[in-house]
Image (cartoon, rainbow, N blue to C red):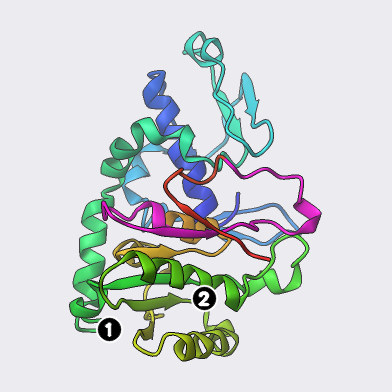
């Protein structure tokens, strides 16, 4: 369910628990996800996730057990639940949006998906053709998530220019060089985003701002984010993964204190962010 970021949480969680409890894992081979009346989301089995093609099935089997996620916080799966059910079909149902579900096997899953090789491929494709290596070597990614959020701010608010200003200022204060900003947004949101970028240019005249090329597929843009030194994410699982895939040992990742809108104010997201990530207060 959901777009690429949401799908990755579910995929990493499923594979990690399959590894931990020595289960076989499978995913449904479909080109789209979503029920009638809801936004359809494409899958990535033929592109980003093609290495999992051997773990796909065309039809849902009979499920003996359905394990439903309890809330939005991390809840460890009951040991006996998975350990003692090796010969039954178990379906995991939920978002599982916490790195804690898969952190122990994260590197293994990344190797399965060839993440490192794909990152190198992206760099080779974009360097000089779109963005210079000199620019990327000192870059901060900045993600703007508008799109359908514009219609549902009570559920998913759009981050303010002040959030991006505070985040950028925080990173600038921590490093000893003048960075560049590579910002990401959808074509339909360029005008609105450029207003924020202009404000930031006025505040940070020494910093060069450049929009990430829109010629890449969304999963390629996610990996391009991960190639930046530091990351300023939106309230989006997409840029969450762009930051989480970042292998820079000294990376600084800023995220907004407000993740959901007032109609989802009861949702607790404390398990979504690693301790070393920096929470920027968004008023």
| Range of residues picked out in magenta | 242-270
Residue with the mark numbered 1: 130
- Would you say residue 253 sits in the magenta stretch? yes
Pick the front one: 251 or 72 = 251
Q: Secondary structure at mark 1?
A: loop
Report, in whole angstroms, how far the alpha carbon at label 1 lies from the one at label 2. 25 Å
Task: Bin the neighbour count of mark 2 within 10 Å (Cα to Cα): few under 14, some 14-19, many 20 and up.
Answer: some
The quadrant where residue 179 appears: bottom left
Residue 53 lies, in percent from the top left, at 36, 44
Q: Secondary structure at mark 2?
A: helix
The furthest residue to the right: 263
Pick the front one: 201 or 111 = 201
Q: Is residue 31 visible?
A: no
Q: Residue at x 31, y 44 (%)?
A: 110
Residue with the mark numbered 2: 165
Magenta: main secondary structure: loop
- Would you say residue 263 sits in the magenta stretch? yes
Residue 205 lies, in percent from the top left, at 39, 90
On-image quarter of the C terminus: bottom right
């Amino acid at each position: 369910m959901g777009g690429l970021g949401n799908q990755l949480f579910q995929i990493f969680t499923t594979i990690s628990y399959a590894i931990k409890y020595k289960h076989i894992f499978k995913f449904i081979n479909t080109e789209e996800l979503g029920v009638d009346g809801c936004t359809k989301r494409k899958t990535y089995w033929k592109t980003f996730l093609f290495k999992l093609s051997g773990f796909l099935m065309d039809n849902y089997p009979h499920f003996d057990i359905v394990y439903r996620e309890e809330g939005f916080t991390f809840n460890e799966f009951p040991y006996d639940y998975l350990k003692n059910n090796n010969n039954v079909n178990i379906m995991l149902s939920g978002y599982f949006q916490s790195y804690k579900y898969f952190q122990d096997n994260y590197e293994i899953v990344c190797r399965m998906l060839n993440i490192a090789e794909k990152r190198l491929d992206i760099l080779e494709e974009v360097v000089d053709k779109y963005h210079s290596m000199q620019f990327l070597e000192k870059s901060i990614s900045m993600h703007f998530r508008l799109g359908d959020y514009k219609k549902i701010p009570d559920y998913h608010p759009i981050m303010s220019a002040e959030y991006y200003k505070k985040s950028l200022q925080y990173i600038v204060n921590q490093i000893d060089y003048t960075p560049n900003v590579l910002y990401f947004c959808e074509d339909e949101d360029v005008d609105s985003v450029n207003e924020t970028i202009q404000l930031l240019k006025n505040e940070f005249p020494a910093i060069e701002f450049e929009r990430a090329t829109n010629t890449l597929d969304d999963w390629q843009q996610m990996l391009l984010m991960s190639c930046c030194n530091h990351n300023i994410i939106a309230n989006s699982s997409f840029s969450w993964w762009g930051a989480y895939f970042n292998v820079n040992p000294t990376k600084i990742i800023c995220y907004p204190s407000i993740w959901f809108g007032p109609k989802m104010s009861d949702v607790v997201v404390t398990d979504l962010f690693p301790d070393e990530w920096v929470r920027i207060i968004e008023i």
